[in-house]
């Protein structure tokens, strides 16, 4: 191992020790009761709420997946995705955050998303809660797998160790950390990690622009790639067995592919996913005061715009500086690592790599905690053992956390998997399953329990149906599964709600109360 590599390892080790220190600091407070462990006692300030929401949301996808898309096929796909996510971030904080913070308190002080849905509709049989918890288990297991893939790719690329051993080591670190501190430690460390992430992105971008000779030189160099720097076209790498071909030291591309209105609409639909993201929605529920959400909205939106802009540009400039180093779509997701280790001094490169680690940890601990709480709080205590003590709930939560992590590791075993693809499926799953019913439960008083169940099942199922059966047909059916699944869920909620008996007077009174509830 070279001296530079050792310096990178030292910088990352110092960072990991800091993260563990945060977990230990909050361990006693978090373990006092399940409310503190799962929601931090609703004590988050505006900065921590905003920055931890974005860090847990973006994950390693921001530093590896998004730059990889830009490196592989150019500006359009990455940029329209980023625009959709930026708009979705703003609208989610604007429309959902205040109402959910109030309504979750009115609805029997709900501390998980399944809890909120069940209490909102007075679901005595816990049907809605169980369905929500099961979907959370499924999609967060997939999400956790994407984070473990990131860990494996990061450490194997940096240090030459095997992908599998590094993936397992990263997963074990996340498990231990999440065990220690719960939601409060996770949110506080996510705040720190969001700072590391944005500094790493901006630093690498600035150095890359300077190295490439400035913006004018960068534009001149990418003009020769058909469709690479267009908003309405997309580059098409010439591949054989999924490997891009090279001739005379130049990566080969075919003719530009069209990027039409339907494709843009499909890509922008990534923004719809925010309305159903439990890791973000929980921050709305956990902030200490509704009045602080306006500040959080501004912080979160600014962070998202700066971070995603930097990530897309890093991919573009990476293609200029290293046109033939990364020759598959999976390898292209290492462009941030390549730029950092080649252009930055070792210690700074270590901090940049800590940015990827930060993104991965901040997301995977959220995913594991929310998924395990969905089972322990909503299925174990809600259905199987209604008189379970707080201690029993937390013990079951930790057991389930380990099981989810093991399944996630198995899903992440194949190093050829593309992080962007894994994340896009889980994102669609949450967006279509929870997004529509979250909006309707907060803003349409006529929504019924039966409509909520139908919408959740229809949205979640359609993600699988469209992804596996319809999308492969191509053409106009080749759109991202989130958009059709989201629309199908909305239709089912409206139709079934109108066909069933309107909500009780008590539910309607709670709905009105939540509009102005002071908290």
Image (cartoon, rainbow, N blue to C red):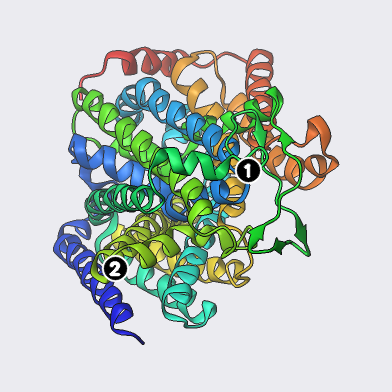
Whether residue 244 sits left or right of residue 439 in the image: it is right
In the image, taking residue 348 as reference, residue 66 lies left or right, namely right
* Mark closer to the chain start, 1 or 2: 1
Position of residue 374 relative to residue 502, above or below, is below
- Judged from this view, the residue extending furthest toward the right is 473
Quadrant placement of the C terminus: top left
- Residue at image point 34% right, 55% down: 362
Q: In x, y percent, where is residue 213?
A: 39, 48
Position above or below: 148 against 270: below
- 319 is higher (above) or lower (below) than 24: above
* 513 relative position to 66: left or right: left
| Mark 2: secondary structure | helix
Residue placed under numbered mark 1 in the picture: 224
Q: Residue at x 44, y 64 (%)?
A: 338
In this rendering, which labeled residue sits more in front, label 1 or label 2? 1
Q: Quadrant of the N terminus?
A: bottom left
Compare residues 511 and 161 and report the one nearer the observer: 161
In x, y percent, where is residue 502? 57, 13
Secondary structure, mark 1, is loop
* Residue 350, numbered circle: 2
The foreground one among 74 and 283 is: 74
- Of the pair 451 and 344, the residue shown nearer to us: 344
- Quadrant housing residue 49: top left
Real-space Cα distance between discs 1 and 2?
A: 34 Å
């Amino acid at each position: 191992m070279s001296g530079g590599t050792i310096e990178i390892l030292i910088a990352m080790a110092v960072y990991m020790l800091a993260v563990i220190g945060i977990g230990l600091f909050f361990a006693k407070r978090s373990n006092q009761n399940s409310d503190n462990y799962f929601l931090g006692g609703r004590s988050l300030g505006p900065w921590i709420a905003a920055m931890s929401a974005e860090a847990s949301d973006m994950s390693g996808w921001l530093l590896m997946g998004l730059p990889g898309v830009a490196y592989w096929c150019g500006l359009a796909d990455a940029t329209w995705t980023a625009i959709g996510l930026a708009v979705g971030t703003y609208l989610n904080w604007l429309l959902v955050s205040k109402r959910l913070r109030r309504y979750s308190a009115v609805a029997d002080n709900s501390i998980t998303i399944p809890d909120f849905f069940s209490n909102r509709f007075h679901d005595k049989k816990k049907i809605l809660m169980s369905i929500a918890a099961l979907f959370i288990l499924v999609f967060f297991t997939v999400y956790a797998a994407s984070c473990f893939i990131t860990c494996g790719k990061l450490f194997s690329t940096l240090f030459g160790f095997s992908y599998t051993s590094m993936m397992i080591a990263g997963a074990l670190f996340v498990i231990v950390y999440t065990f220690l501190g719960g939601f409060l430690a996770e949110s506080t460390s996510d705040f720190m990690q969001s700072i590391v992430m944005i500094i790493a992105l901006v630093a690498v971008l600035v150095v890359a622009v300077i190295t490439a000779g400035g913006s004018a030189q960068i534009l001149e160099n990418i003009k020769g790639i058909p469709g690479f720097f267009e908003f309405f076209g997309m580059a098409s790498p010439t591949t054989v067995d999924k490997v891009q071909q090279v001739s005379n030291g130049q990566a080969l591309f075919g003719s530009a592919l069209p990027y039409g209105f339907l494709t843009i609409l499909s890509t922008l639909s990534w923004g719809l996913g925010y309305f159903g993201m439990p890791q973000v929605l929980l921050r709305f529920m956990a902030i200490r005061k509704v009045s602080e959400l306006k500040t959080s909205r501004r912080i979160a939106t600014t962070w998202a715009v700066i971070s995603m802009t930097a990530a897309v540009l890093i991919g573009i400039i990476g293609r200029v500086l290293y046109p033939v180093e990364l020759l598959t779509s999976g390898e292209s997701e290492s462009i941030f690592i390549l730029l950092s280790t080649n252009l930055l001094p070792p210690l700074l490169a270590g901090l940049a790599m800590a940015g990827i680690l930060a993104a991965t940890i901040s997301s995977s601990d959220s995913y594991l905690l929310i998924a395990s709480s969905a089972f322990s709080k909503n299925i174990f205590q809600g259905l199987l053992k209604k008189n379970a003590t707080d201690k029993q709930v937390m013990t079951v939560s930790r057991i389930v956390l380990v099981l989810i992590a093991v399944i996630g590791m198995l899903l992440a075993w194949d190093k050829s998997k593309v992080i962007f693809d894994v994340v896009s499926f889980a994102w669609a799953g949450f967006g279509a399953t929870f997004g529509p019913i979250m909006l309707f439960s907060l803003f349409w008083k006529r929504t019924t329990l039966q409509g909520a169940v139908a919408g959740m099942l229809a949205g979640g199922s359609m993600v699988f149906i469209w992804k596996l059966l319809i999308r492969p047909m191509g053409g106009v059916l080749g759109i991202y599964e989130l958009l059709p699944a989201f629309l199908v869920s909305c239709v089912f909620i409206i139709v079934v709600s109108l066909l069933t008996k309107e909500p009780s007077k008590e539910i309607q009174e709670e709905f009105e109360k939540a509009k102005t509830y002071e908290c």
